[in-house]
Image (cartoon, rainbow, N blue to C red):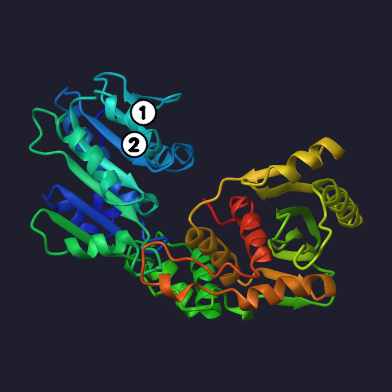
């Protein structure tokens, strides 16, 4: 193996010195966006493995995310980046089916798993484990999900290692009563636990670029609470109203200096008692989002209610109006629980609506907050879009659930709110909200 000297002091901010030097087995790293906590863990795990590689020993590391399909674009690339910092990437084989990064000479391996495939994770006899990393730990349901796998990994400790070291990294949810916020707080001061907090303000080495700082300052100017939550990692609380309506910016007409690139649609549907709504959202060259038009039908108090075939026909007619903008229609999102209208539209017009995989309500709303706080959302001030604005004005958290791990919204007059969340969450990468 080619031995490479790495100046860790140039790669890891001084703020993380306690993480690098600690001998504690359990290490919880929490903090705001752009704090580089994940990069520090990746570098430390590679460093731990290199110490074994230099002795010709085989040593393994396990990296876990809640959902397997998020591995490629996050922890898998992050470990490759860290290995390259040590100048050793050519000494490893990288495979994606399954996700593994294996040292050619010793067989030492970084294994990547989704906790959603727990049985496979539990049954794999890896052996020689020196470290385990739970990335985006707030995505897990509760601490018991860690406990289920930790015991398995500890049994497979490398014989020359004094312990298996565990790492958790996450951005604290804004809800102070979220289970992971309460969990990490309860472990502060425990003998075997390091609980470490960081933010972009702790960057002394200049990793935060001017472009990043400009984005941060824009959000700080638009929404101080959201800035504190997103970039300082503070659980600022939810409040009662879900949205700050100052972030919904009206337009009398489309701006001449910001052309539309494409249009997406999103749908929330109902039949007997709840409303059906569609929204058309334009993405512009300046990366802004403009609500072009809203369709809304409520069967409430109507004796004769529209059938799926009626709603399919009206959706198609509405879509034809949107096509008048002469811009490509990209993703057409619909509630994954809705099969009737989705099947009817495909049967009638061969249009495939994309069912979105829904997450916890607080997480879906959080992604909408991210877009709004950047000052990038606009709507055409038309009669059709008034229902969209009115429902968002009234959209509230259920006060009886605010002091819980899973806060709920008041489920009244919220159909366009759900539709907007479906649009944002089905287009995170396109909107620059997921990296």
Residue picked out by circle 2:
83
- Decide if residue 235 is on the left or right side of residue 365: left
Q: Any mark on residue 114, and which?
A: none
Residue picked out by circle 1:
101
- Decide if residue 267 is on the left or right side of residue 8: right
Q: Relative to residue 235, is residue 103 depicted above or below?
A: above
State whether residue 15 appears in this view. Answer: no
Horizontal and vertical percent for residue 15?
25, 63
| Front-lying residue, 267 or 400 | 400
Q: Nearer the viewer, mark 1 or mark 2?
A: 1
Residue contact between numbered discs 1 and 2, judged by CB atoms under 8 Å: yes
Residue depicted at 21% across the width and 52% down the height? 27
Horizontal and vertical percent for residue 12?
28, 54
The quarter of the picture where the N terminus appears is top left
Count of numbered circles in the view: 2
- Decide if residue 271 is on the left or right side of residue 202: right
Crowd around label 2: few <14 · some 14–19 · many ≥20 (10 Å): many
Looking at the image, is mark 1 or mark 2 earlier in the sequence? 2
């Amino acid at each position: 193996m080619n031995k490479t000297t790495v100046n860790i002091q140039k790669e890891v901010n001084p703020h993380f010195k306690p993480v690098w030097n600690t001998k504690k087995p359990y290490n919880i790293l929490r903090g705001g966006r752009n704090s580089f906590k994940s990069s520090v863990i990746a570098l430390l795990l590679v460093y731990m493995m290199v110490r074994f590689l230099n002795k010709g020993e085989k040593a393994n590391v396990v990296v876990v995310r809640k959902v397997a399909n998020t591995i490629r674009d996050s922890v898998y690339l992050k470990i490759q980046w860290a290995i390259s910092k040590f100048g050793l990437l050519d000494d490893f084989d990288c495979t994606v089916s399954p996700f593994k990064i294996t040292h050619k000479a010793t067989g030492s391996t970084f294994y990547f798993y989704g906790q959603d495939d727990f049985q496979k994770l539990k049954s794999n006899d890896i052996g020689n484990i020196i470290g385990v990393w739970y990335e985006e730990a707030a995505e897990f349901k509760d601490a018991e999900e860690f406990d289920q796998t930790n015991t398995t990994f500890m049994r497979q400790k490398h014989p020359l290692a004094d312990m298996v070291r565990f790492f958790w990294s996450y951005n604290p949810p804004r809800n102070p009563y979220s289970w992971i916020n309460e969990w990490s707080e309860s472990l502060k001061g425990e003998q075997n636990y390091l609980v470490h907090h960081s933010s972009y303000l702790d960057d002394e080495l200049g990793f935060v670029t001017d472009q990043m700082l400009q984005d941060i300052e824009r959000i700080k100017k638009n929404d101080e609470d959201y800035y504190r939550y997103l970039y300082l990692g503070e659980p600022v609380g939810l409040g009662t109203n879900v949205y700050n309506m100052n972030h919904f910016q009206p337009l009398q007409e489309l701006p001449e200096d910001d052309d539309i690139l494409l249009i997406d649609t999103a749908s929330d549907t109902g039949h007997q008692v709840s409303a059906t709504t569609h929204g058309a959202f334009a993405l512009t060259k300046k990366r802004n989002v403009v609500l072009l038009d809203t369709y809304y039908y409520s069967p409430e108090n109507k004796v004769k209610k529209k059938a799926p075939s009626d709603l399919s026909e009206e959706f198609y007619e509405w879509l034809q109006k949107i096509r008048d903008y002469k811009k490509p229609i990209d993703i057409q999102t619909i509630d994954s629980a809705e099969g009737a209208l989705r099947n009817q539209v495909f049967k009638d017009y061969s249009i495939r609506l994309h069912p979105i995989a829904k997450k916890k309500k607080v997480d879906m709303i959080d992604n909408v907050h991210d877009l709004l706080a950047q000052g990038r959302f606009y709507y055409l001030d038309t009669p059709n879009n008034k229902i969209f604005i009115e429902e968002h004005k009234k959209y509230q958290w259920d006060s009886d659930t605010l002091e819980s791990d899973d806060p709920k919204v008041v489920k009244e007059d919220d159909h366009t709110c759900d539709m907007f969340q479906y649009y944002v969450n089905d287009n995170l990468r396109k909107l620059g909200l997921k990296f």
